[in-house]
Image: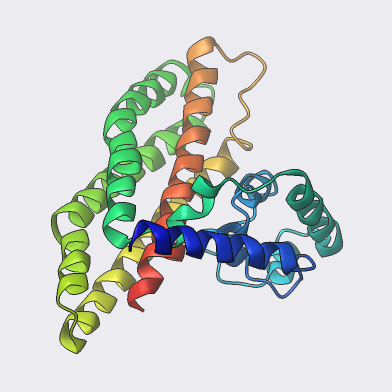
Amino acid sequence: METKQLNDSISDSKQAQSVQAGFTPDALVRDIVLQFPKAADYFKAKRIDFCCGGAKPLAEAAAERGLDQEIIISDLNKLFEEYPVPEEEIAWNTAPSDELIDHIINKHHRYLREELPLISQNVTKVYRVHGGDSPHLVELHSLFNTLKEELLTHTAKEEEDEFPKLLTYDANPSEEGLSSLRESLSELESEHDGAGDILRKMRSITDDFTPPAHACTTYRLTYARLEELESMTFEHVHLENNILFPRYQ
């Protein structure tokens, strides 16, 4: 997409935001985040899934969490008024697929390759030192290692096979190519769901990544890094499930 077209698209998106009266119970969670990226932080705080489970109305997502939808809508509309949306935050909605893919690889895949081994060291150390009197750390160690292997395998597959297929299709679109892509993307989304399930279990058994009062520095650092991993994974999956993949569905 030419620079002028991208800027025009961003401008149109911002104009649409200014016209809209406010968020509604029928708005899909993922669409709210696409329109207003800061909503992602709010949804994280409320434990509302905007990536894997984002294709549902806000009212339904609120009900699942036992939350008052009117309060959520009021909070979102207030945030929307208080925080302008920087152009760079909505640019990925309309950026060419090759640029978005480069961003995903250079930011999110790189993060996983660099951070997962380091987090693994922390998780293992805490498990070995405190696992005897904190049985949940045994499960946490197992869940994390499963997640680590799945994420590294998943990202390698995307870089080696699936992302090149997307770009090949962009260059030479065909019905046969699109059908093959849809099967591949469905599998990737299923893997995202699996990672999301593991992260939810990890959050549950750690009491929302809250270290006990007696926790040492390594223990506290481990929980902080796991929570960061969750946040980065949500952002990563959001870019793929809600922006990149729908272009081919």
Quarter of the rendering occupied by the N terminus:
bottom left
- Tell me the quarter of the picture where residue 127 sits: top left
Residue pictured at 31% horizontal, 64% vertical: 188
How many marks on residues? 0
Residue for point 28% across, 77% down: 182
Instruction: Name the image quarter holding the C terminus.
Output: bottom left
114, above or below 220, in the image: below
Q: Position of residue 51 (x, y in %)?
A: 51, 59
What is the image's colouring? rainbow
Viewer-side residue, 57 vs 246: 246
Is residue 52 visible in the rendered image? The answer is: no
Q: Residue furthest bottom?
A: 175
Residue 118 visible in the shown view:
yes
Q: In screen coordinates, is 234 left or right of 33? A: left
**Could you tell me which residue is drawn at 58 percent across and 15 percent down?**
215
**At 70% across and 49% down in the image, what residue appears?**
46
Task: Classify residue 210 as left or right of residue 127.
Answer: right
Which percent across, then down, holds residue 79?
Answer: 76, 48
Q: Position of residue 31 (x, y in %)?
A: 59, 66
2 on left or right of 232: left
Residue nearer the viewer, 227 or 57: 57
Residue 144 lies, with reference to residue 13, above or below; the image says above
Closer-to-camera residue (204/54): 54
